[in-house]
Image (spheres, rainbow, N blue to C red):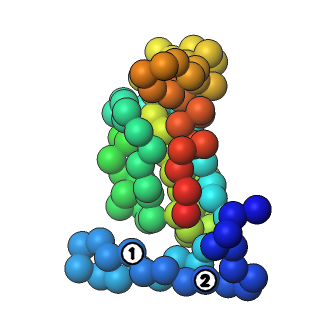
Amino acid sequence: MPANYLHGVETIEVERSGVPVKIVKSGVVGLTGSSAITTTKPVLCLNQTDDAQFGTRGTIPTALKIMRRYCNGAILVISQPLNATPVDIIGTVTEVAKSGLEQLQDSFN
């Protein structure tokens, strides 16, 4: 258990576009899939404006649209090319870097 674990709710402020957004640290939603935009590391999406950067093709835009219907929280997105295979999405660990879903292990709130 980490030494800085807090019991209860902790709120942090994320400043983007001049408008502070308060996020309650409660859990992390990680999403990996395919889109027209490929990312090399996780991208934090806080709202539909952030989601739009992934375009309209692939599995990520569809998943983000469905998720925003039910919640409006922070989502870490790892995007793979449109022709990605399941192995690409799951990812691998090499001496140099991690890819796919394996990158979420290096992310933290």
Near-viewer residue (87 or 70): 87
Near-viewer residue (109 or 78): 109
Examine the rendering and report whether any part of residue 51 can be seen. Answer: yes
Above or below 106: residue 81? above
- The residue sitting at 58% across, 20% down in the picture is 92
Q: Residue 72: horizontal and vertical position, in percent? A: 56, 69
Above or below 32: residue 86? above
- The residue sitting at 36% across, 51% down in the picture is 52
Above or below 100: residue 75? below
For disc 2, the marked residue is: 10
Q: Quadrant of the C terminus?
A: bottom right
- The residue sitting at 45% across, 34% down in the picture is 79
Helix, strand or loop at label 2? It is: loop
Question: Is disc 2 surrounded by few (<14), some (14 to 19) or many (20+) residues within 10 Å?
Answer: few
Q: Tell whether label 1 touches label 2 (CB within 8 Å).
A: no
Q: Residue 44: horizontal and vertical position, in percent? A: 43, 56
Examine the rendering and report whether any part of residue 60 can be seen. Answer: no
Q: How many marks?
A: 2
Place residue 91 in its image quadrant.
top right
Above or below 20: residue 44? above
- The residue sitting at 56% across, 22% down in the picture is 93
Helix, strand or loop at label 1? It is: strand
Q: Quadrant of the N terminus?
A: bottom right
For disc 1, the marked residue is: 14
Find the residue positioned furthest to the front: 3
Kind of residue at disc 1: Val
Q: CA distance from mark 2 to mark 1?
A: 13 Å
On residue 101, the disc is none
Front of the two marks 2 and 1: 2
Question: Is disc 1 surrounded by few (<14), some (14 to 19) or many (20+) residues within 10 Å?
Answer: few
Place residue 82 in its image quadrant.
top left
